[in-house]
Amino acid sequence: MLTEAIPQEIREQLEQKREQMNANTEDANLIGAAAFEAPREDILVDTIIALYLGKNVLLKGPTGSGKTKLAEHVSAIFNQPMHAVNCSTDLDAEALLGFKTLSHDEQGHSQIVFIPGPIMKAMTKGHFLYIDEINMAKPETLSLINGVLDYRRSITNPFTGEVITAHPDFRVVAAINEGYMGTVPLNEALKNRFVTVDIPYLQGEALYKLLKSKSVLHDDKLLRTYVQLSADLVTLIEMGQLPDEAGSIRALLDACDLTAYIPPMRAVARAIADKLEDERERAAVINTAETLF
């Protein structure tokens, strides 16, 4: 699982930590699967090294490029459970930190208890925290966790007044899709708290191996045709003629799966083209596919 490109000192430390980790049954279910196919080896290596050093890592890349898969992959490599936060404009302190609720003790007496949220759980247990689409959240909400992301590694629980200091093994991975509707640019103070790793779309032989291993489509010629379709779509994206989502590997895999049962052109329309809002963009995808199928 650990490539030779990772320094030996770090490999040995990670292997030792993996042997020492004894997550309980509930927490073990939160450990991700090592299923990320890296477009380049340095993407995985640099992410592992940064997390080993205790850095926060920001994964940048278009939708469907595998950012969540990478977060799950490093969770598996470190053998640490991962708690996830999915950001939106409605995200509030309770969704991040937890909430108070009425409970009853064994004698039936009412009491108010605090139920910890994903950040509190990850900090106290020394787990991974994955913040997906971090630039979808309102800046005032993200400001709540500034202390979590810098050298202080602590936060004051606004619901209890308790100061929580993170376990030494606590790590933060965040993901961002730039330029999408509903997103806002991250302010400089927040960006400076991260090491940034760009995740491009998987291409070429690596993409072929992924499709072959994950898709129910087993026709080798069609799989390689889909690899070429992906390359052509990415070229159009780079030329500004298509949005990033047209190159989604997730959508490409959907098209491959559908092609096991329906004609390729219909599969491309259902899985890729019809998701696009602009009629010209849909036509561009279909026209590109028609040159191949």
Image (cartoon, rainbow, N blue to C red):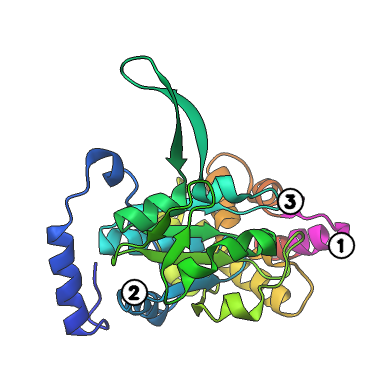
Q: Can residue 233 be spotted in the picture?
A: yes
Q: Quadrant of the N terminus?
A: bottom left
Label 1, residues with CA under 10 Å away: few <14, some 14-19, many ≥20? few
Labels 2 and 3: the sequence-earlier one: 2
Q: Main secondary structure of the magenta part?
A: helix
Spatial CA span between label 1 and label 3: 12 Å
Labels 1 and 3: the sequence-earlier one: 3
Q: Is residue 160 above or below residue 178?
A: above
Which of the labelled discs sits on residue 280, or is there none?
A: 1
Does the magenta run of residues contain 280? yes
Which of the labelled discs sits on residue 261, or is there none?
A: none
2, 139: nearer the viewer: 139
Which of the labelled discs sits on residue 48, or is there none?
A: 2
What is the total number of numbered labels drawn onto the structure image?
Answer: 3
Labels 1 and 2: the sequence-earlier one: 2
For residue 226, side relative to residue 265 (left or right): left
Q: Amino acid at mark 3?
A: Lys
Which of the labelled discs sits on residue 275, or is there none?
A: 3
270, 78: nearer the viewer: 78
Q: Position of residue 289 (x, y in %)?
A: 69, 61
Describe the element under mark 1 as helix, strand or loop.
helix
For residue 229, side relative to residue 44 (left or right): right
| Foreground: disc 2 or disc 3 | 2
For residue 135, side relative to residue 164 (left or right): right
Q: Amino acid at mark 2?
A: Ile
Label 2, residues with CA under 10 Å away: few <14, some 14-19, many ≥20? many
Give, as a single range, the part of the protein colored magenta.
273-287
Q: Position of residue 212 (x, y in %)?
A: 41, 57
Q: Amino acid at mark 1?
A: Arg
Describe the element under mark 2 as helix, strand or loop.
helix
Label 3, residues with CA under 10 Å away: few <14, some 14-19, many ≥20? some
Query: CB atoms at circles 1 and 3 under 8 Å apart?
Result: no
